[in-house]
Image: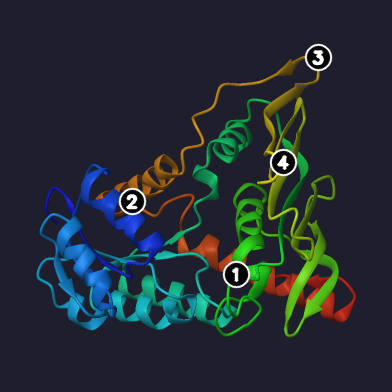
Amino acid sequence: MTDKVRVGIVGLGRLGRRHAENLAFRVDGAELVAAASPIEAERAWAKGALAGAATYSGLEELLAHPGLDAVWLVTPTSLHADQTIAAIKAGKHVFCEKPIALKAADGKRMVETATACGKLLLIGQVVPFFPEFNFAYKAITSGKYGKLRGGHFKRMISDPTWLPNYFDPATTGGPMLDLHIHDAHFIRLVCGMPRQVQSAGTFRGEVVERLSTQFLFADPGLIVTAATGVIPQQGRPFTYSYEIYLERATILCEYAALPKAGDIVTPVTVLTDNGKVERPKVASGDVMATFQAELAEVVRSVSAYQPSPILSGELARDALTICFKETESVRKGRAVKVG
């Protein structure tokens, strides 16, 4: 491998362009050498914006580009499994946007292929890089406030009528795979894999519309819950929050986007066991900086040929499995085993 990780990106929609610009201009250690899209206007954008990167119409052509170390896949989720496996078998490390796949079996197949071929598979579960979640992640893993004892996570949107096929299990997968996958991943990251899930909720067609889940772990003192989904009330388009309970502190934050009334924000707040209320300084919430941090972690991982503790395919596969087990629990009306 050269001093820089030579990257080819497939998919140049809104998110793909964000990744491409970061790789080309803002992430140290990366060199964007190729970009692919089946859409002529997106290829034209790449030719003008990406400092000489070669352009191709699809993955197969891009994989033939000389000297590629890694492939970025920012493509529809329905394509993730087959494209990832093709790129890995072509000898490339792969970064793939979340969710890892639309089916648990495909996520498993992707991870197994990467392991068999000795290549890294990293999945774009970006939430741990957002400042409020990054603070919580570091507080938990450092042990600064003692052992993790539980938490509650919430992530809701209004009915996304602007997104076609949102509730189609063959294209988007509904709020479980678009929204809740973030909290499922974070819970898996900091708590480990639950033994069981107990979920109650409603369906729209074949996918869960809204649910509330109790995660059950080997440690009965680890109490974790989550709520997610779609509320058919257009006045509240997006909200997320968490309360995380540690032995010596509670960490909390909340954000609700209310375009007609102004956003509601509770910044990261630490409530300590000695009665103090602290508002720690965290990094700005600049979205571009967050994605830069995520991509820098991918480049570091590939450069060192070491799995990422945050973005590994195994964690993303487990988060997907959790989501489907929660769906099963709603359908059956009882707790189900995860492992």
Contact flag, marks 3 and 2 (Cβ < 8 Å): no
* Placement of 251 over or under 104, stated as above or below: above
Q: Which residue is mark 3?
A: 274
Contact flag, marks 4 and 2 (Cβ < 8 Å): no
- Seen from this angle, which residue lies furthest right? 333
* Placement of 109 over or under 152, stated as above or below: below
Callout 1 secondary element: loop
Q: What label sits on residue 339 in the rendered view?
A: none
Which marked residue is nearer to the observer: mark 1 or mark 3? Answer: 1
Q: Residues within 10 Å of mark 4 (few under 14, many from 20)?
A: few
Question: Which residue occupies 53% across, 36% down?
Answer: 131
Separation of marks 1 and 4 at Cα, in angstroms: 21 Å
Q: Which residue is mark 2?
A: 301
What amino acid is at disc 1?
Answer: Trp
Q: What label sits on residue 261 in the rendered view?
A: 4
Contact flag, marks 1 and 4 (Cβ < 8 Å): no
Scheme by which the image is coloured:
rainbow
Callout 2 secondary element: helix
Contact flag, marks 1 and 3 (Cβ < 8 Å): no
* Direction from residue 267 to residue 66 in the image, left or right: left
* Direction from residue 159 to residue 32 in the image, left or right: left
* Direction from residue 274 to residue 270 in the image, left or right: left
Question: Which residue occupies 56% across, 21% down?
Answer: 281
Q: Tag 2 or tag 4, which sits nearer the N-term?
A: 4
What amino acid is at disc 4?
Answer: Ala
Image location (x, y in percent) of residue 13: 37, 67
Image location (x, y in percent) of residue 179: 64, 61
Callout 4 secondary element: loop
Q: Residues within 10 Å of mark 3 (few under 14, many from 20)?
A: few
Separation of marks 4 and 2 at Cα, in angstroms: 42 Å
Image location (x, y in percent) of residue 280: 61, 21
Q: Residues within 10 Å of mark 2 (few under 14, many from 20)?
A: some
